[in-house]
């Protein structure tokens, strides 16, 4: 929990220090103490020695909050990706091949895979990562995935936020009984949220309702994969249950959008998944116009979106969803924080965690303007410079 002065920023996202002046972010004990004009810095911090990071006239934004990833897995599905390039359709059942590889991996292999991917996330400016289980699909294997997240958390500077996704498929008729009666009791202590993949080839609305209600009884915050492959009613269920987030929403309808807004459910949009699957893009503008809080996330997983890059996701959100740069950065920071129901991240107001990114340019529009390029100059987590 370090002290740091981030000096000479051209601009700081969400904070106006007035008059086009260069700004400084004061981080004390790992938390943002103030954002001030450079000229007022000595008044703010006194004469003492502070570690400094020189932003050199570039832009500063909060660290990205990637609120939807599946970082715990082994193996890869490059052959499946190639088959799709040749015209094959995506099917949720492809998850089973990652399940086999994940079950065959050792605990250490799972941990090192998470740590490696978290390092890539951090290098791209992501300081908080939600991580779902879901490639175990047995009580023992799901618990092992969450234990790997717990152990990886001590080996990366990024914060990992674990979600139980034992209901990533419903492979057998009595599988939901297993999730509710055995997996949740065994796994709940290792997770913050409970998710379910409600879609064609995965769970029905009734199955997802059962899982999310049971998860809530164990204190887990409900969230849901909804309307990704087709419209099946997951978004309405999210509104009914008051889920923290409904994710994907490619096939979301107008009444769904109104219901999500009224229930305060955050829409976590995953444009890299649409990109990789070459499918339709979620109607982001419709959701924003309906008053829904929108978050952007990577969905990093070996089946449908093998990327850790929030800058790439922001590029897609601007080019494919038609968001402006402010909307996209807000969704990738404060939006993600809202999806995780966190008030201490995703912004740089006093009291926030000292998690920030120095963009390699004077303005955050540079992120979307340079798709696929490295636009990150520095990353700071809890006041420590990690890149
Ligand atoms: O979010 N939709 C569910 N889970 C992942 C993909 C799962 C897989 O194919 O491995 C997703 O797209
Ligand atoms: Fe997902």
Image (cartoon, rainbow, N blue to C red):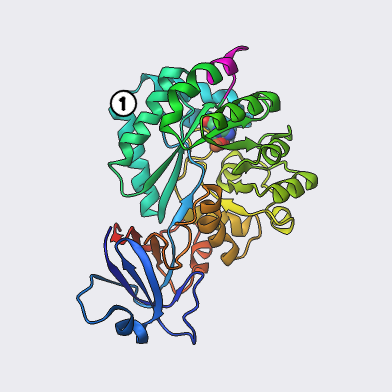
**Residue 76's spot in the image, x, y percent?**
43, 30
Q: Residue at x 49, y 73 (%)?
A: 15
In depth, the one of 122 and 189 nearer the eye is 189
What residue did someone put label 1 on? 107
Q: Which residues are the magenta region?
A: 169-179
Say whether residue 253 is visible: yes
**Direction from residue 74 to residue 84 in the image, left or right:** right
Point out the residue furthest to the left here.
49
| Residue 153 occupies quadrant | top left
Between 217 and 171, the one nearer to me in the picture: 217
Based on the displayed image, in which of its 4 quarters is residue 44 positioned?
A: bottom left
Q: Quadrant of residue 201?
A: top right
* Residue 361 placement, left or right of 365: left
Does 75 sit above or below residue 331?
above
Seen in the picture, residue 281 relative to 51 is either above or below; the reply is above
Toward the viewer: 14 or 78? 14
Judged from this view, the residue extending furthest toward the right is: 255
Indicate which quadrant contains ligand 2: top right
How packed mark 1 is, by other alpha carbons closer than 10 Å (few <14, some 14-19, many 20 or more), is: some
Magenta stretch: includes residue 171 = yes
Q: Is residue 333 above or below residue 190?
A: below
Residue 61 located within the stretch drawn in magenta: no
Side of 377 relative to 316 (left or right)? left
- Residue 378 seen in the current view: no
x and y percentages locating residue 127 in the rendered image: 40, 53
Identify the residue at image location x=70%, y=28%: 205
Residue 373 pos. (x, y %): 44, 58
Figure check: 173 above or below 266 = above
Query: What quarter of the picture does the N terminus occupy?
Result: bottom left
Q: Is mark 1 within 8 Å of ligand 1?
A: no
């Amino acid at each position: 929990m370090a002290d740091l002065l981030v000096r000479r920023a051209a601009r700081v996202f969400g904070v106006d220090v007035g008059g086009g002046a260069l700004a400084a972010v004061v981080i004390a004990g790992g938390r943002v103490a103030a954002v001030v004009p450079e000229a007022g810095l000595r008044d703010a911090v006194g004469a003492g020695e502070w570690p400094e990071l020189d932003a050199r006239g570039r832009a500063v934004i909060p660290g990205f909050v990637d609120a939807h990833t599946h970082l715990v897995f082994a193996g890869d599905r490059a052959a499946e990706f190639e088959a799709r390039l040749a015209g094959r359709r995506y099917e949720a059942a492809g998850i089973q091949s990652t399940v086999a590889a994940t079950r065959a991996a050792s605990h250490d292999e799972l941990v090192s895979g998470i740590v490696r991917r978290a390092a890539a996330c951090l290098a791209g400016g992501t300081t908080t990562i939600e991580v779902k289980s879901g490639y175990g699909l047995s009580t023992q294997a799901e618990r092992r995935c969450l234990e790997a997240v717990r152990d990886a958390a001590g080996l990366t500077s990024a914060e990992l936020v674990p979600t139980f996704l034992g209901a990533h498929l419903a492979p057998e008729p009595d599988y939901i009984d297993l999730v509710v009666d055995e997996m949740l009791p065994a796994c709940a202590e290792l997770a913050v949220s409970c998710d379910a993949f409600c879609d064609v080839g995965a769970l029905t609305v009734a199955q997802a309702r059962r899982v999310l209600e049971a998860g809530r009884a164990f204190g887990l915050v409900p969230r849901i994969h909804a309307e990704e492959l087709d419209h099946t009613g997951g978004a309405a269920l999210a509104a009914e249950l008051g889920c923290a987030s409904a994710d994907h929403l490619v096939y979301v309808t107008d009444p769904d959008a109104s219901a999500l807004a009224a229930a305060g459910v955050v829409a976590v949009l995953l444009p890299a998944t649409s990109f990789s699957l070459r499918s339709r893009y979620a109607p982001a503008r419709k959701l924003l116009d309906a008053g829904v809080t929108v978050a952007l996330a990577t969905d990093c997983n070996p089946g449908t979106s093998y990327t850790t890059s929030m800058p790439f996701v922001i590029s897609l959100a601007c080019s494919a969803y038609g968001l402006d740069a402010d909307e996209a950065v807000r969704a990738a920071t404060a939006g993600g924080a809202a999806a995780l129901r966190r008030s201490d991240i995703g912004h740089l107001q006093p009291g926030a965690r000292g998690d920030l990114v120095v963009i390699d340019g004077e303005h955050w529009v540079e992120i979307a303007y340079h798709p696929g390029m490295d636009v990150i100059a520095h990353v700071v987590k809890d006041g420590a410079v990690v890149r």
